[in-house]
Image (cartoon, rainbow, N blue to C red):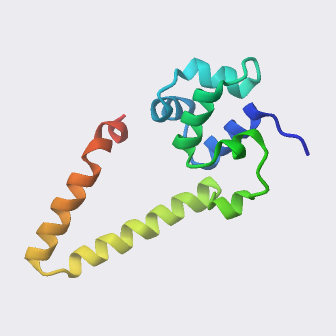
Amino acid sequence: MYINVGERIRELRKARGLNQDQLAELSMLNRVTIAKYESGRVEPGAQALSRMADALDVAVDDLLGRSETSDKEHGLLSKDKYEKAKTIEAKLISKGIDRMPPEARKRALTIMKLIFVEYADYFDK
């Protein structure tokens, strides 16, 4: 079955649980531009394809439909499964931190803050 580039972008974006604003921010493109790509009104150029592929963590060939790789092989999950996986990961991290000695916990939390600080503004929206 033929899927155009715009449909593939929308499919991958939704599979990642992102809205157009979030994909636009991650790919450093305009939301209106993303909407035009997804609707098929405008075809993305090489730079836009590269940025969206990076933001969606796929190869450009996947956006173009040239890849034989399935969504399952890419690790794409439905939104429900993705949310469940995030919950499981959060519980695992929380349990691990709770079981650490106080000094190790303090170091782990400091490291996590340093890693995630650049994304804090993104998640506050």
Give residue 120's position: percent from left, percent from top. 29, 42
Q: Quadrant of residue 123?
A: top left
Tell whether 67 sits left or right of 80. Answer: right
70 in relation to 17, above or below: below
Q: Which residue is pictured at 68% across the width and 64% down the height?
A: 73
User: How many marks overall?
Assistant: 0
Residue 79: x %, y % from top left = 60, 53
Q: Quadrant of residue 13?
A: top right
9 relative to 114, above or below: above
Camera-side residue of 88 and 61: 61
Picture quadrant of residue 99 = bottom left
Q: Nearer the viewer, residue 78 or 54?
A: 54
Horizontally, residue 7 falls left or right of residue 95, namely: right
Q: Residue furthest left?
A: 103
Query: Extreme front residue here?
Result: 46
| Placement of 52 over or under 15, stated as above or below | above
Identify the residue shown where x is 57% and y is 44%.
56
The correct choice, above or below, for 12 with respect to 103 in the image is above
Residue drawn at (68%, 37%), measured in percent from left and top?
9
Q: Position of residue 41 (x, y in %)?
A: 75, 17
> Could you tell me which quadrant the C terminus lies in?
top left
Residue at image coords 55%, 22%: 31
Of 95 and 52, which appears nearest the observer? 52
Q: Where is residue 117 drawn, in percent x and y?
A: 24, 46
